[in-house]
Image (tube, rainbow, N blue to C red):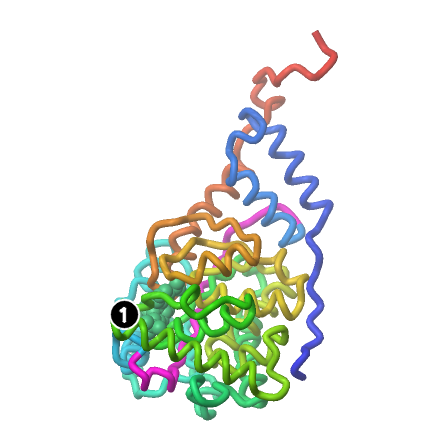
Amino acid sequence: MALSPHWVFPELDASAVGAARARQDTLTKPRGSLGVLEDLAVALAGIQGGPPASRPAAAVLFAADHPVVRHGVSAYPPEVTAAMVANFVRGGAAASVLCRNLGVELRVVDVGVAHPYERVDGGDGARLRRDPVADDPMGDLRIEDALSEAVYERALRAGAAEIDALGGDTRVVLLGDMGIGNTTAAAAMTALLLGLAPEDVVGAGTGVSGDALSRKVEVVRDATRRAQGASGVQRTDPHRVVQAVGGKEIAALVGAMARAIERRIAVLVDGFIVSAAALALVRMCAGARSGMLFAHRSAERGHAHVLAALDARPLLDLGMRLGEASAALAALPLLDAACALHAGMATFASASVPDRARPGTP
Ligand SMILES: O=C(O)c1ccc[n+]([C@@H]2O[C@H](COP(=O)([O-])O)[C@@H](O)[C@H]2O)c1
Ligand SMILES: Cc1cc2nc[nH]c2cc1C
């Protein structure tokens, strides 16, 4: 895959959209009264190219570490990334519980976890794969590119490969991340892609405040200056932005999202980190936008800017800031409800409920 991959994204299926909207208008409710649940059914139909479906759904998390943590930008130590990978597999993480609760398959891909973790087999938690890109080097984005061009391309492919491994009938993929330090990377990407000041995009992440928060702002300032100063790194080149200040899990998310959209699998975007990857992909190829649904507005400071730039209306606003696809999983029942209503409600005709008068009739 070259630096400008030849992604060909399908357009929304206009006839599926028309059929879904027409069916919504025949169902036994005042037109439009199910609000966003109607829009969700219609959007899924357009993305999927047929009657809307929320299942089978799969949650795919990409995990990696970030050398930038050496500057004290996270409230937690980097060993947490590895420990959480083991926790996903054992079934004890928030994502594990939500997946079990919803009957959703959880897949975790290690694309760059720096510390060893216990490999637990046979639990009822996640399926874990360590991609070979995990062994490639990463840079401290404050002083050097996070990813070489070759590593960036391998990480994109690792993401796409995981989508190719999903069952052919998968209709929705919930994308998530795990990586101590990655709100610093996502903030630097957001600052570059949107031309915003570090203060406007840096937030608490896992919970930094005071001096640590100021340090994080300075790290993002240094990273964005470095990236803009380096020859060829323009904020308008989203591939270079991911390479310069992103990370392996963020590049893998870009690759996964692109492949899912190509396959007409609806992408349910999680929080700040996944949204930063979505913004980069849309800047690479505007046609990707229509394949995405946005689960929530994270409490992380920069997220609102990313959502606004994508003209995204998130489904939930619950003060969540966990990552690991947890908010996408919290939003999935809304997609389930939208599809069940669309498929299962009676029509005015079938239930003999009088429809509203048509204009011109008495
Ligand atoms: O998704 C979000 O909006 C979000 C907001 C804050 C933190 N996180 C999670 O917390 C980790 C990154 O936080 P930090 O402070 O280490 O940069 C990483 O594992 C993310 O999944 C995620
Ligand atoms: C415990 C913990 C769990 C997480 N899940 C996603 N990011 C996380 C960060 C921490 C610190």
- Residue at the spot 57% in from the left edge and 17% down from the top edge: 353
Q: Ligand 1 is in which quadrant of the figure?
A: bottom left
Q: Residue 25 sits in which quadrant?
A: top right
Q: Position of residue 146 (x, y in %)?
A: 48, 85
Identified at 55% across, 24% down, the residue is 30
Whether residue 122 is visible here, answered yes or no, is no
Amino acid under disc 1? Val
Position of residue 285 in the picture relative to residue 129 (left or right): right
Given residues 184 and 289, the one toward you in this image is 184
Kindly identify the residue that appears in the image at 26 percent across and 80 percent down. 77
Q: Is residue 356 rendered to the left or right of residue 120? A: right
- Can residue 260 be seen by looking at this rendering? yes
Density class for disc 1 (Cα within 10 Å; few <14, some 14-19, many ≥20) is: some
In the image, is residue 36 above or below residue 240? above
Image quarter of the C terminus? top right
> Residue 287: image x %, image y %?
68, 61
Q: Is mark 1 within 8 Å of ligand 1?
A: yes
SS state under label 1: loop
Range drawn in magenta:
50-72
In the rendered image, which quarter is residue 141 located in? bottom left
Is residue 71 covered in magenta?
yes
Query: In the image, is residue 226 above or below residue 20?
Result: below
**Image location (x, y in percent) of residue 323:** 37, 65
Q: Quadrant of the N terminus?
A: bottom right
Asked if the magenta segment contains residue 345, the reply would be: no
In the picture shown, does residue 269 fall above or below 64? Answer: above
Q: Which residue is mark 1?
A: 208
Q: Is residue 316 shown above or below 183?
A: above
Q: From the viewer's perspective, is 314 left or right of 7?
A: left
